Image (tube, grey):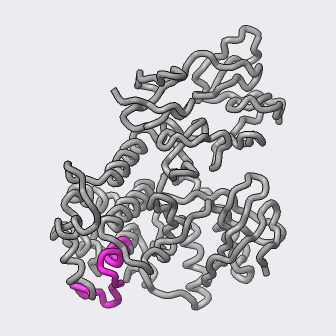
């Protein structure tokens, strides 16, 4: 039994957040990184040898899904004889949010993110199979992130075998033991219908379901037709996967809400779009173009917008990022700035911190080494993009880094910026003026 104020390794348990048939979720504090996290601890009687083997496979599966609307696993393994899964801590779940009144435009913003997350997974032929409001975690600025990819399938099998659990958002064929990507499409339809109508359709899923009158007052006929297709009892009549569903939704997204529903949400600007909605579109376009190129995997702790670990300031709000708060793909971490370092580095390449290694005598090559150290006496002379210091000789990088394919530079530091998207330089924090 895990209790509040108990320590599990470096984690201090602060509060019990939720409990289900598969696991208990706690809010905890990481005493090393200095950040709050969420710990999911499965019930001990469910942790069989087979389930552990499943976990190893599914954690590797989850690691492939690098998307801003999918919640990453920070760590998974045994701590003090308890199996613990560690996640970034959100503000709550979509299920919590649905207990309060939800504006139509907010529901539309959530629909954007829900479809993007599942469509990205379906692109790699990965099904979630447990899409429900409790598995969408809410972060600042109305950002949703889908949790439990892969693990949801283990939980479903385990709970089903123990005789617990409810039908909820599960597709009919999935309840009969024949799940597919189309099962996720059905669950998406239920979830979106619930957000806009306030009611959850139940078996036998006759059309129109309860709450249809409210749905008609808010949504355009083409969006309603798409929901009807997604909620077809015959799986062959649905969208084949979330990608196809998302593509169809994008074509009618501007007409998804009726004018009356849209105008009751808030004041509109002269061009017919709110500032908040415009920023959402701008951030989405930025991620679509630069998420992989700039290795954008984290969020600003102040504004919640996407940032990369090597950014020294948030490009959206200008908040200083002297210490990184988020995940890293590199194998070790600098104790001073919490950014990733490679095992053969002698110094941190980001913060000029004290000597950290090398942690191994082996020299590693990396296709991501794109720069050259200007020190003639340097032993290696190779640099990762946007590093401030050479990790072998500690000399400061003098040649400004540019963003591949873009020539815009910051007026203050000379490093590359994206004035189309950013309001601040992520390298020096100074405001960027659009030209």
* Along the line of sight, the residue nearer the viewer: 98 or 244: 98
| Extreme-top residue of the structure | 376
Q: Quadrant of residue 104?
A: bottom left
Q: Quadrant of residue 379?
A: top right
* Residue that appears at 58% across and 28% down: 386
In the displayed structure image, the side of residue 87 where residue 258 appears, left or right: left
Answer yes or no: is residue 358 visible.
no
* Along the line of sight, the residue nearer the viewer: 36 or 249: 36
Answer yes or no: is residue 260 visible.
yes
Give the residues drawn in magenta, as a range. Answer: 188-209
Q: Quadrant of residue 45?
A: bottom right
Residue 60 spot, x, y in % from top left: 61, 56
- 151 lies above or below 305: below
In the displayed structure image, the side of residue 125 where residue 18 appears, left or right: right
Residue 277 located within the stretch drawn in magenta: no
Residue 145 spot, x, y in % from top left: 49, 61
* Residue that appears at 38% across and 64% down: 110
Residue 401 spot, x, y in % from top left: 54, 23
- 160 lies above or below 350: below
* Residue that appears at 58% across and 69% down: 151
Residue 205 located within the stretch drawn in magenta: yes
- 208 lies above or below 272: below
* Residue that appears at 22% across and 85% down: 207
Q: Say how many tags the image has.
A: 0
Residue 51 spot, x, y in % from top left: 67, 73
* Along the line of sight, the residue nearer the viewer: 264 or 45: 264
Q: Quadrant of the N terminus?
A: bottom right
Q: Quadrant of the C terminus?
A: top left
């Amino acid at each position: 039994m895990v209790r509040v104020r108990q320590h599990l390794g470096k984690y201090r348990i602060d509060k019990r957040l939720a409990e289900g048939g598969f696991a208990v979720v706690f809010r905890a504090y990481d005493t090393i990184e200095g950040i709050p996290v969420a710990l999911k601890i499965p019930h001990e009687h469910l942790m069989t040898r087979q389930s552990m083997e499943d976990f190893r496979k599914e954690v590797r599966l989850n690691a492939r899904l690098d998307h801003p609307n999918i919640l990453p696993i920070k760590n998974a393994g045994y701590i003090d004889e308890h199996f613990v899964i560690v996640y970034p801590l959100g503000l709550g779940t979509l299920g919590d949010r649905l207990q309060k009144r939800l504006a139509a435009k907010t529901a539309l913003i959530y629909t954007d993110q829900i479809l993007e997350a599942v469509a990205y997974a379906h692109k790699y032929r990965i099904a979630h199979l447990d899409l429900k409001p409790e598995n969408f975690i809410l972060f600042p600025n109305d950002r949703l992130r889908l949790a439990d990819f892969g693990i949801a399938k283990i939980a479903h099998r385990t709970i089903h075998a123990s005789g617990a659990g409810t039908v909820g958002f599960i597709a009919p064929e999935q309840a009969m033991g024949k799940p597919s990507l189309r099962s996720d499409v059905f669950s998406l339809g239920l979830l979106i219908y619930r957000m806009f109508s306030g009611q959850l359709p139940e078996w036998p899923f006759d059309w129109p379901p309860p709450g249809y009158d409210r749905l008609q007052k808010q949504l355009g006929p083409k969006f309603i037709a798409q929901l009807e297709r997604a909620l077809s009892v015959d799986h062959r009549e649905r969208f084949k996967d979330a990608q196809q569903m998302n593509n169809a939704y994008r074509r009618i997204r501007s007409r998804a809400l009726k004018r009356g529903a849209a105008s009751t949400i808030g004041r509109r600007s002269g061009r017919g779009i709110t500032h908040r909605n415009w920023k959402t579109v701008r951030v989405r376009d930025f991620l679509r173009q630069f998420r992989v190129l700039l290795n954008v995997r984290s969020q600003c702790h102040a504004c919640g917008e996407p940032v990369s670990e090597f950014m020294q300031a948030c490009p959206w709000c200008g908040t200083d990022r002297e210490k990184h708060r988020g995940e890293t793909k590199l194998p070790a971490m600098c104790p001073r700035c919490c950014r990733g370092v490679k095992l053969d580095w002698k110094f941190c390449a980001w913060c000029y911190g004290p000597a950290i290694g090398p942690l191994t005598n082996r020299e590693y090559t990396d296709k991501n080494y794109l720069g050259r150290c200007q020190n003639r006496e340097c032993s290696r002379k190779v640099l990762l993009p946007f590093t401030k210091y050479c990790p072998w000789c500690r000399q400061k990088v003098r040649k400004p880094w540019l963003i591949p394919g873009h020539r815009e530079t910051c007026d203050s530091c000379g490093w590359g910026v994206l004035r189309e998207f950013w309001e601040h330089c992520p390298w020096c924090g100074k405001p960027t003026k659009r030209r």
